[in-house]
Structures are given as structure tokens and as C-alpha cells.
Amino acid sequence: MSTDKFRDCIEACIRCAHACEHCAQSCLRESDVTPMAACIQTDRDCAEACWMAAAFMSRGSLFIEEVCDVCAKICDACAAECEKHEMDHCQKCAEACRRCAHECRTMSGVHA
């Protein structure tokens, strides 16, 4: 099975995972980390979901639709959390999460 049709979604997942990893690390460097705990946790969950979705699509798994649907939901949650914070890294992460959620929903066939 050719995975070319997944290219845009794979790329969005990888960009999102990178943004989430960067955001989590940047949050850990804030002077007061405590208010950032939920952001850090959500960033890490989202990055892991994005890496997994990219891997499933890269190998043409039978479970791509289900994994992409879950990834989109996690991306939405991460974007909502990051949007609560004014830091540039959080805002950039939220944007990457929204783009990834859109691509994953397109891939999974869920447009809600």
C-alpha cells in the first residue's frame, strides 16, 4: 500500500509532535513551572499521539482511521490548554495542534 496519500497528515503530525516537545521543554524552563503542569502533560500526551499516528500511517496500518481520530481529539485538548497561556511557544504549539487535528480528521473521515 502506498502511503503517499497520507503525506500531508504525516507531516502535520510530525510538525505537531515537534511543537509539543518544544512547548513542554519551554514550559519546564519557566520561572514558575507549577501553573504549566497541565500544559506540559498535555504537550507530552499530544506529541506521543502524533508520533504514533505518523508511524501508523507510514506503515499503512489497518488502524489508521481510529488512531487519527484519537490523535485529533488529543490535539484539540492540547490546543485548548496551550491557548490558555500567553507564551509564544504555547501559541505556536496550539496552532500546530489545530492544523494536525484538521489533517487527522480529514484522514479519519471524521469532520466533527
Image (tube, helix red, strand yellow):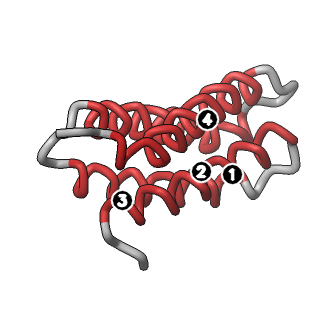
> Mark 4 highlights which residue?
20
Q: Which secondary structure, mark 4?
A: helix
CA–CA distance in space, label 1 to label 4: 9 Å
Name the amino acid, label 2.
Cys
> Mark 3 highlights which residue?
107
> Mark 1 highlights which residue?
94
Name the amino acid, label 1.
Ala
Disc 4 residue crowd, few under 14, some 14–19, many 20+, Cα 10 Å: many
Lower sequence index among marks 3 and 4? 4
CA–CA distance in space, label 4 to label 2: 8 Å
Q: Which secondary structure, mark 1?
A: helix
In the image, 24: left or right of 52?
A: right
Circles 2, 1 touching at the beta carbon (< 8 Å): yes
In the image, 50: left or right of 60?
A: right
Is 105 placed above or below 51 here? below
CA–CA distance in space, label 2 to label 1: 5 Å
Disc 2 residue crowd, few under 14, some 14–19, many 20+, Cα 10 Å: many
> Mark 2 highlights which residue?
97
Residue at left offset 69%, top offset 22%: 25
Q: Where does residue 60 sit, x and y in percent of width and height? A: 20, 39
Circles 1, 3 touching at the beta carbon (< 8 Å): no
Foreground of the two, 105 or 74 = 105
Name the amino acid, label 3.
Met
Q: Which of the 4 quarters of the picture holds residue 24?
A: top right
Name the amino acid, label 4.
Cys
Lower sequence index among marks 1 and 4? 4
